[in-house]
């Protein structure tokens, strides 16, 4: 009976010790997360590194290594982030999903460090291992983006075409591939190729963002070829929703195309949208105001043109150059 009591006491104490040790990791990890959420990066690193020392399970080690890398990444210390995340690959019997996520982070950090060849080497390595087409597409698009950064546009084209072939027609990844392909063509000044491809694409059911980009670059390509009617058609298909700079650029280009076509009233309305968009920076709004004045001048509506120029001169954030342009037009109006 005494032996049983002693054995139970020892076993119970041993269990408590194990529970405390197990709790140490979780407690340290949770404290690290709280400090990270409050932007206490140094405090978070202290807690995560202590948790790493306490980690016994592979899952714990993986989790805390990712956390440490994330802290360094948020501080833009990508070299340190990469050093810690690479250690995940040293863990035995690493699951495929953890390996793929590790390579994603390694590529991200290498790219941020402008270590493009290292990133491409990692992409080649993971492409030999991944089975799922979605993963392959992700890394192929990453490769294309890095090749763009290196200005290796023909190689980037090949990577994107390989990606598109793997995607189901119309899928979000397929759309992203088509968007990227058009941008790469534009960077090579292959304007007619863009126009041909944009016409061939059936964009029914596309998500807003990739559709907007294809329309936008098709419009720019037509502008470069001085096909202003075609350009106006592509820009006109775009909506006035989304990022303010995109709305500005769309209406600026559409207004310019319409101006070239001498459709001054339609052009005026494009520039008016820019001026009235309070989400835009004042510099761009002032540009819109000047272009409104110019359209009225071209329509021989000199009174309105004069009023708009005077308004621009009083505009709080107008630059000296913008004010000079307004004064120059006012001199023309006096004559």
Image: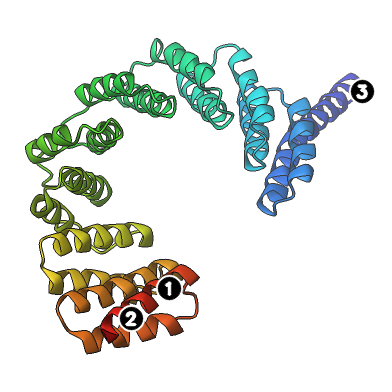
The residue that disc 1 covers is 324
Label 3 and label 2: CA atoms lie apart by 110 Å
Q: Residue at x 28, y 63 (%)?
A: 241
- Provide residue 143's location: percent of width, then percent of height: 39, 23
Looking at the rendered structure, the secondary structure element under dot 3 is helix
Could you tell me if residue 319 is visible in this image? no
What is the count of numbered marks?
3
- Provide residue 53's location: percent of width, then percent of height: 78, 26
> Split into 4 quadrants, where in the image is the N terminus?
top right
Looking at the rendered structure, the secondary structure element under dot 1 is helix
The residue that disc 3 covers is 2
Please rate how many residues cluster around mark 2, counting C-alpha atoms within 10 Å: few if below 14, some from 14 to 19, many from 20: few
Q: Judge whether 79 appears above or below 279 on screen.
A: above
Looking at the rendered structure, the secondary structure element under dot 2 is helix
Please rate how many residues cluster around mark 1, counting C-alpha atoms within 10 Å: few if below 14, some from 14 to 19, many from 20: few
Depth check, mark 2 against mark 1: the one in front is: 2
- Provide residue 198's location: percent of width, then percent of height: 13, 39
Q: Judge whether 320 appears above or below 258 on screen.
A: below
Earlier-in-chain disc, 1 versus 3: 3
Are the residues flagged by discs 2 and 1 in contact, CB closer than 8 Å?
no
- Determine whether, in the image, residue 88 is placed left or right of residue 1: left
Earlier-in-chain disc, 2 versus 1: 1
Q: Residue at x 27, y 83 (%)?
A: 333
Q: Judge whether 107 appears above or below 67 on screen.
A: above
Any mark on residue 331, and which?
2
């Amino acid at each position: 009976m005494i032996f049983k009591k002693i054995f139970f006491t020892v076993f119970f104490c041993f269990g408590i010790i194990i529970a405390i040790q197990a709790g140490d990791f979780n407690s340290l990890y949770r404290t690290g997360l709280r400090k990270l959420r409050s932007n206490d990066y140094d405090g978070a690193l202290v807690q995560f590194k202590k948790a790493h020392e306490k980690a016994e399970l592979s899952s714990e080690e993986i989790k805390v290594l990712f956390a440490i890398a994330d802290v360094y990444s948020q501080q833009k210390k990508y070299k340190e982030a990469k050093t810690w995340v690479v250690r995940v690959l040293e863990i035995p019997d690493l699951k495929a999903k953890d390996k793929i996520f590790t390579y994603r982070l390694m590529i991200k950090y290498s790219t941020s460090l402008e270590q493009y060849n290292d990133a491409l080497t990692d992409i080649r390595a993971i492409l030999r291992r991944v089975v799922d087409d979605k993963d392959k597409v992700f890394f192929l698009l990453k490769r294309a983006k890095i090749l763009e950064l290196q200005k290796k546009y023909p190689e980037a084209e090949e990577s994107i075409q390989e990606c598109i072939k793997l995607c189901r027609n119309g899928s979000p990844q397929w759309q992203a591939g088509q968007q990227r392909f058009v941008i790469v063509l534009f960077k090579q000044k292959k304007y007619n190729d863009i126009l041909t491809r944009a016409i061939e694409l059936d964009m029914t059911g596309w998500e807003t963002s990739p559709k907007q980009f294809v329309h936008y670059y098709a419009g720019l390509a037509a502008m470069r070829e001085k096909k202003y009617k075609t350009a106006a058609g592509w820009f006109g298909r775009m909506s006035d929703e989304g990022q303010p700079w995109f709305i500005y650029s769309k209406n600026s280009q559409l207004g310019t195309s319409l101006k070239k076509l001498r459709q001054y009233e339609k052009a005026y309305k494009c520039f008016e949208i820019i001026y009235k968009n309070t989400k835009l920076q004042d510099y761009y709004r002032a540009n819109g105001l000047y272009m409104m004045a110019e359209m009225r001048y071209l329509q021989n509506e000199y009174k309105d043109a004069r009023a708009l120029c005077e308004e621009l001169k009083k505009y709080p954030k107008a630059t000296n150059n913008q004010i000079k342009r307004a004064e120059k037009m006012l001199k023309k109006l006096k004559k």
